[in-house]
Image (tube, helix red, strand yellow):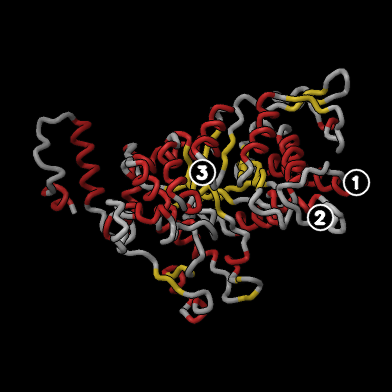
Amino acid sequence: MRKRICNSSHFRTIKGLPVCLAYFRFIMAIVYHCETASTLYMSRALQKMTGLKQIRYFDIGFNISDHMFKGKYHGKKQHETDLSNILNRCRLTNVDKLLITGSSLEESRHSIKLCSEFATENGPKMMYTIGVHPCQVNEFMPKHSKSYRKSDSSEDLPFAIENHQFTKARLHELYDLWKLQAMTDNEHFRAIGEIGLDYDRFHFSGLEIQKFFFLEQLKLSCFFPDKPLFLHMRSCADDFLHILKLFINGFNDDKDLFGYKSWIDPSVPDSPILNTDGSVTYKFSAARKFVVHSFTGSVQDMEILLDCSQNCYFSVNGCSMRSEESIEMIKSLPVDKLLLETDAPWCDVRRTHASYRFLNQDADPKIENCWDHGLSAAYPTLDQWFKSVKKEKLQTIPREQWDLYMVKSRNEPCTMGHVATAVANIKQIPLIDLVDQVWHTSCLVYED
């Protein structure tokens, strides 16, 4: 090994050079000669020691509790759970950190359990969010409620709580879960969400019920002023911005419908304030960060959000780059406000998307082999991409080979390099520079 290093072009003619430069070239020679799986890990360790930029990913949107990862598709069992293999593929593709998204009380609890169950020393670090997705806020209402129904965006009837005690109990349950995890597992409980508005889908929760419980969850979040927000925004820019601005600027609530004021502790900085007239002031901490995840808005939406707060960030995935309009949005998005995600098992980069051509370095739509035309640079420890198998065929493959196979049409965190490659080529930024910036921004938001 010593002879190979000393004869390397990376190590010649060091006589007379400063010691630090000679040391740097020595380190680079070792990195250059990392050829086996074990030495690839040495290479990454040396990169960290020397402060060099490296390819590493923080997927801030992974729906680990989705039934697809248990082998169930549309209610039918197709194969055994392969979650351990999915996490192994994260390791093989330098996906070092995962933020697991909570979409309901039940799913949040399940995600917390899975994070603990599948945590390994060599696997990705897993953290999680807790919250109720706009399409699931009907869980705050009894199932027999009249408000538990389909509605459309033309609905403007005032929202009415039909079972106040049920709703109060469910909101308190959410608060208690946040409080418990903040006290016992704050290292892994890293954000409140996924909460927000989704006006593309009213067949789960109507417009008014979505707005009402977005507001209520944001009120509750003010009792945890240091926790970042993980937000959902779909075709709802005006209402989303209106509600968000209430908390950025601060407002008084004189109703306290669900008895939050009893939790107010004046000794906690930046928490809600109980006023002399009995009203409660809710206002975000000046340092509170929030991420609009899976952002699909326009350039104008993005600019308005940034004008509202410099603590606003945007995360993009395959669905964020489907159209030519969204490509323009990606070009305009400030790189220091950008995070990346897969939103697996959804939102992969598809051939029908405008972004697909950006998977190769020339953005040439005629190039079909993206791997050999730039995509492989996003996966420096892989010789080739994983094989694809239909969901019903995975069970026929020997279990010890499952690390090598991805289920067709099911997205995974290991595809973070696809998202990064497309964004880097759209923005015409070197991949390593984009990945390094996004990594540090993601850690700033979720591990500060």
Q: Tell me which residue sits at (43%, 36%) in the image.
A: 332
Q: Say what secondary structure mark 1 lies in.
A: helix
Sequence order check, earlier mark of 1 and 3: 1
* Image-based side of 233 in relation to 223, left or right: left
- Residue 179 in sight: no
Q: Nearer the viewer, mark 1 or mark 2?
A: 2
Q: Position of residue 361 (x, y in %)?
A: 29, 51
Sequence order check, earlier mark of 1 and 2: 2
Sequence order check, earlier mark of 3 and 2: 2
Separation of marks 1 and 2 at Cα, in angstroms:
16 Å
Three-letter amino acid code at the position of disc 1: Gln
Mark 2, residue position: 148
Separation of marks 3 and 2 at Cα, in angstroms:
31 Å
Separation of marks 1 and 3 at Cα, in angstroms:
37 Å
Residue 315 - label: 3
Q: Quadrant of residue 414?
A: bottom left
Q: Nearer the viewer, residue 99 or 68?
A: 68
Three-letter amino acid code at the position of disc 2: Tyr
Q: Position of residue 140 (x, y in %)?
A: 80, 50
Q: Say what secondary structure mark 2 lies in.
A: loop
Q: Say what secondary structure mark 3 lies in.
A: strand
Q: Position of residue 369 (x, y in %)?
A: 30, 63
Q: Tell me which residue sits at (64%, 42%) in the image.
A: 236
Mark 1, residue position: 165
Tell how many labels.
Answer: 3
* Image-based side of 420 in relation to 412, left or right: left
* Badge 3 vs badge 2, beta-carbon distance below 8 Å: no
Residue farthest front in this picture: 154
Three-letter amino acid code at the position of disc 3: Ser
